[in-house]
Amino acid sequence: MRDPFNWSIPLFRAFGIQVKLHILYIVITLGILGRTYYQDPSHIGEFALIWVVILFASILLHEFGHCFAARSVDGEADEILMWPLGGLAYCNVPHTVRANFITVAGGPLVNVLICLVSGAAIMAASYLPPVNIFQSRQLYYPELTNYRTGGSGLPGYEEPPYHLKKGTNEIVFALKIIKTPAGARYAVSDDNKLYEIEDPKFEAYPAWVLWLSRIFWVNLLLIAFNMALPAFPMDAGRMLQCYLWHRSDDYNRATQTACYVGMATAMLLTILAFVFNDSMLFALAVFIVFSCYQQLMILASGMEERGAFGYDFSKGYGGFGPDEDAPPKPKRVGPIKRWLLARKVRKEQRETEQRIADETRLDDLLDKISRMGKDSLTAEERRFMERVSTRYRNRP
């Protein structure tokens, strides 16, 4: 109970991956549903399906994408934790730019695939998918345009809230309709203004189109959420780290730069959180700052944290059981220290194996130069020798 990351319950195991649900996820979900019921009890069933099923499933598939991508590059992935700010896929991959980038990209690619499939099905029904992620009401009341008939895109609801036309093209988002004794009808819009209306006409969507539109919008939002924020350890921040790592061939420098960019992004999110009075946005900013600070401390201690993708932490963060390799001390070693020590052992083993393989190949190339001359080397062999030589020169 000392470690908040251990406040979880196991849900199920699939493909050798244990899926756990954080207690706070349950608490916050119940709070959101309670607030929704207080504001609009007539649609609590739909809201529950959207929040509990669609959003949960989309995030979970995103994390499975990270896990399968990690395994495709000979990495390990054995646990997923669903928690209030998304999901945490615990992965451990080879210490290469390619392996890290593929693992990072695996999550958003799943959401892209879901959008492509659901969007194609929606278009097959003659509608255009909802692509405006800045209108949150599209999640509940999508406004789809029928590109064959030129339909107005008004949803087929006969209960509040209404989407009504005012004038020629403008749509009023009405909370309720008032009838006067004389028979006149007025719509009360979301900005508390009254608009006189005639009988509203709605275009009824098929139920499967309505739910596919919601699935499309949720996954489109997840893509934007992960790829638009260059904040470590979000997906875009990890991709920035991989790009800088590829350009500089220096993991530590690339990670430091990505962390500083992440902190700057978190400051911007904090400002937006106060402007829009959004507590979840502020919590995300705090999480990013904490993650970046923790990563910088790990680098400063001479140990590298790897294996976290998107807004994921690496396995063992905050302690996930005792570490048998940790040397005994008079005082009990804390969970973070145990994790760092275990990471250091595995890191040294991988570096030793990689160094032996590089030295063996380097000896073969030097023997080739002595027999056939330097011009006999291929472009890839020259780059390998330069990379290995640079690594040895930069050794402390």
Image (tube, rainbow, N blue to C red):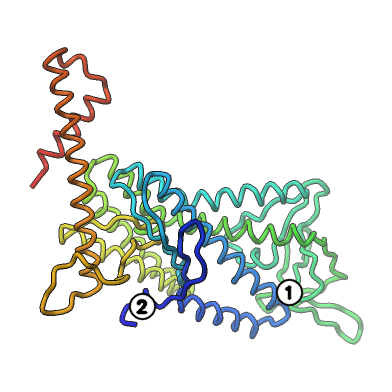
Earlier residue among tags 1 and 2: 2
CA distance for labels 1 and 2: 40 Å
Q: Position of residue 118 (x, y in %)?
A: 66, 52
Amino acid found under the numbered disc labelled 1: Pro
Q: Position of residue 301 (x, y in %)?
A: 15, 61
* Left or right of residue 200: residue 160: left
Give the residue drawn at x 57%, y 65%: 55
Per the image, the residue denoted by label 2 is 4
Q: Is residue 253 visible?
A: no
Q: Nearer the viewer, residue 158 or 353?
A: 353
- Estimate how packed mark 1 is, as few (under 14), some (14 to 19) or many (20 or more) residues with alpha carbons within 10 Å: some
Q: Position of residue 1 (x, y in %)?
A: 34, 82
Amino acid found under the numbered disc labelled 2: Pro
Give the residue drawn at x 15%, y 57%: 302
Secondary element under disc 2, as helix, strand or loop, is helix
Per the image, the residue denoted by label 1 is 161
Q: Position of residue 9 (x, y in %)?
A: 46, 75
Q: Nearer the viewer, residue 18 or 298?
A: 18
Q: Nearer the viewer, residue 135 or 164?
A: 135
